[in-house]
Amino acid sequence: MNDLLRILAGPLLWLATFSAVYGLNGVVCGVCAGGTAFGDVSLPRVIFAVAWLVAIGLQLGLVAALHTARLGSRSSFVRVVSRTTGWVGLAASLWTLFPTVVTSSCL
Amino acid sequence: MNALKRHRRLDAIWSSQPGWKGWFSTVNHSDVGRMFLATAFFHFLVGGVLAMLIRAQLATPHSAFAGPEIYNQLFTMHGTIMMFLFAIPTFEGLAIYLLPKMLGTRDLAYPRLTAYGFWCYFFGGAMLLLSLVLGIAPDGGWFMYPPLTGPIYSPGINTDFWLIGITFVEISAICAAVEFTVSILKYRAPGMSLAKMPIFAWYALVTSLMILTGFPPLILGSILLEVERAFGLPFFQAEHGGDSLLWQHLFWLFGHPEVYIIFLPAAGVVSTIIPVMARTTLLGYGWVVAAVVALAFLSFGLWVHHMFATGIPHMGLAFFSAASTLVAVPTGIQIFAWIGTLWKGRPQLHLPMLHILGFFVTFVIGGLTGVMVAVVPFDWQVHDTAFVTAHLHYVLFGGFVFPMLAAIYYWLPLATGRKRFFRLGEVAFALVFFGFHLTFLAMHWVGLMGQRRRIPTYAPEDGWTTINLISSIGGFIMAIGLAIVLLEVVLHMTTRHRVARNPWRSGSLEWAMTLPPPAYNFASLPHVEGRDPLWADEALAVRLARGEGYLGDPPDGQRETLTVDIATGDPDYHVVYPANTRLPIVFSAVTGLFFLSLLLKVYWLTPLAVAGVAAVGWGWVWTLGRREDPGTQDVGRGVRLPSSDSVARSPGWWGSLFLLVANATFFGSLLFGYAFLWTVAPDWPPPALIAPSLFVVAVALAGAAFGVAGIALADRANRRGGAPVSGLGIALLGTLGSAAAFAWLMIGTPDPAGHAYGATLFVLGAYGLFHAALAVLMTCFLIARLRSGFMAPGRAAGLPIVGLWMAYLALVTVPILLAAYLPWVLA
Ligand code: HEM
Ligand SMILES: [Cu+2]
């Protein structure tokens, strides 16, 4: 069971952060669409960018954990597959949440 | 014991009743798998006839063949049948039939559940077909968008057939998914670690997990819409705080994963057949597994791409557009693995291979148009045109039907023990392939010229006449091809042309048995050392028949098998299966009565049907008990194993765990719906909020805690040889309290029919009440078990299962209370 979880962890984390940021987008734009921070950068933009960085940080942490001897699997097959899916989660976070810093935040 | 005597002995134990009676009482996976496949292909036939009617109507402008009302039913039922009654059940049937054989065991984890799932599918499908015959079939399109399908615009019974019938059918999908998950994880031949599983099992495992998490949102949506239609609770009506977009979210949360649920098993077939046809092993096994897992998860982050045209905020569009393009990568990895496998082997162009080539061409084109519609501005142009219909058929027909045709020709010799002797299949392939591309290539074109989907007719001035005629001709050519496939299968089954064992010379275990397979599959279970056991040991089949594997000495009257450790594949428990029984068909008939009472609005029958379900369910579990300790069993090859009835992590525990995964997804979707309405729907916050009740909070929390603690106490007492009475008493008290608290919460909900807020809270309360009532029932069951002498330290399997459900009740109690009272506290 733990081996199964290791294999599923990376993409599962992506799914969670992806949905969370999508939800955050709805909530933040409902509450403070107009605010600004740091000069002329809008507040929502800052929040979303931070959320993206947090998501990337979490994925990095997971990949690192899967590479350790203590948290990685004992089966070499599961080790390879789980590390691959861990990297998949990281790549997916980078690519799918990239719009947080480029598209209009609340339109 | 010699091989023949062993065969006779096993056959007497495992066979279903002879004649037609056997159909109603069999629980054997080979029987039920065949029944599933036959029923699914019957539905394919019906769906195909509907498609022909659609194409006949569209062949000429101003066609008067079918009026708009009938046309609406035609395309709705075509889509619905193909998706829910053909594609998913075909996967279920194929996996039910094949998995135990591939995994080197004798049956799936819960044989009676296999049969129950089949009958739910059968009755649910019959309900929908009946509506078609009566001319009152669903007509709101296969995705049933409200407000069109709401009580105001679709007052008739048509929509109810869909909502209730499909929910009934979904039960079978959930049953099958739980069963496959547990079977693949636990019911394998000894020695088969995760790394040595046949690749199809990985695909089936991932698909099953996707069903468990993908179907609940749809079941929730269907229940909410049906409740809105029948009782007026407004979830989707904007004027009462509802939002029709909520349906679209729930539907596509299911709907996009659904297309991958259809595609992945087909890809599993391709990954299984290609290496055999190329006389080599699959290139990059680990990469393929990783790609399948990645694909499964990515497909859950795409649902909004079906809603690009609904006015979603830009950033949301960009997220889902990015995710939609990304999903092409793991699909591409698989395609490269297949090409690489063909490259390194010596491919032979047998008939299954032909269909796989057809799959390649068609699916790649469908994938490319898929990337096109993933790009938002392009999608805005072609949304709801024939271009989208063409795209979806390239992926569904290309990605599912071609691989399934390959599967038919590949595994037919296994199922029948015979070979084909006419070469009709090649002709059929040519007709299907060219017919398909003629039909749907043309539809891309006419879609780009502006023909919308789901229109009953068009005018000559539109300029679509020639293309539509070509498309319809293509459709009929394809239909002739498919009819020839059917003809050939029938000929194959009725002629005597025995095939040698393992005709394709595959390395996989399903070919290590006599053909057609006996009811028990393997006379003794193999010990697996690698991914291709039959290549490693050509004489394996003979050695297994001689009883050189595990469980080669069948005791009288017991259907036995063993389970393994999930990761390593070391044998861990000995299992005895239940035998032939009519309980599954009775159980699903009673379940059907419940759905029927809702459909026909005979509400006095509903509580009776619920009581019936509870009673039959009680009997179902009751028969599993033992009054004496099983002790450890000799399973052969010098191994002794404890019985699965004696351990905490029994098959029932694993099944409950995965059922609860599905259940939690259902609950999560409900909370999502609540949050969605709060943030997006007009007319919120609601006019009146419910005020926190100290009684409800205290009793619900205490009840949940008592339930968990009571079962834990009882379990400990039982394992130490004491009497679990006091623990069970505490649990009963707690669960009764929980039930009372949730009932009180429901009573106090402000006007459920007036605003979506009250309606959603009411459903949340009902969800809690349902689980509390279930917990009461389970506790009573345990008490009855205790009194009848079924509980002992050596039979510890029952209590942990109920413990799991108690923990779940506690887990959902907190969010329900928060959802109910937090808004008032904050306001
Ligand atoms: C046997 C050959 C088939 C033909 C000739 C065919 C033809 C068609 C046509 C012409 C439509 C468009 C109806 C309209 O927009 O007015 C359609 C819709 C559809 N088809 Fe098929 N189809 C076939 C097989 C399949 C298969 C195998 C599947 C799925 C596994 C499928 C799933 C669907 C779906 C989901 C729709 C959309 C229904 C809706 O708009 O509500 N079809 N089909
Ligand atoms: Cu999609």
Image (cartoon, helix red, strand yellow):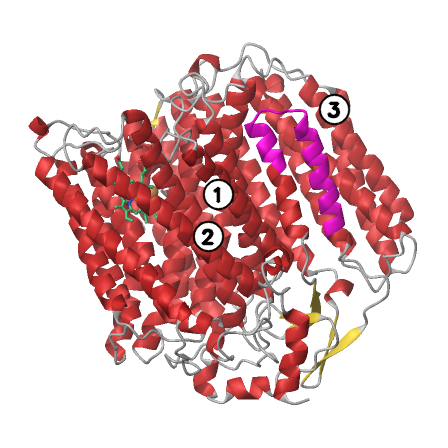
Q: Chain of mark 3?
A: B
Give the residue displayed 63% in from the left and 54% down from the top.
B655
| Location of residue B781 in the rendering, given as x and y in whole percent from the top left corner | 81, 46
| Location of residue B512 in the rendering, given as x and y in whole percent from the top left corner | 50, 80
Q: Are marks 1 and 2 on the same chain?
A: yes
- Is the residue at mark 2 in contact range of ligand 1, meaning its CB lies under 8 Å from it? no
- Asked if the residues shown at circle 3 and circle 1 are in contact, with their CB atoms under 8 angstroms apart, the answer is no
Left or right of B597 in this view: B336: left
Question: Is-magenta flag for residue B255?
Answer: no
Q: Secondary structure at mark 2?
A: helix
| Location of residue B317 in the rendering, given as x and y in whole percent from the top left corner | 30, 34
The magenta segment is: B593-620
**To which residue does mark 1 refer?**
B125
Question: Amino acid under label 2?
Answer: Thr
- Asked if the residues shown at circle 1 and circle 2 are in contact, with their CB atoms under 8 angstroms apart, the answer is yes
**To which residue does mark 2 refer?**
B39
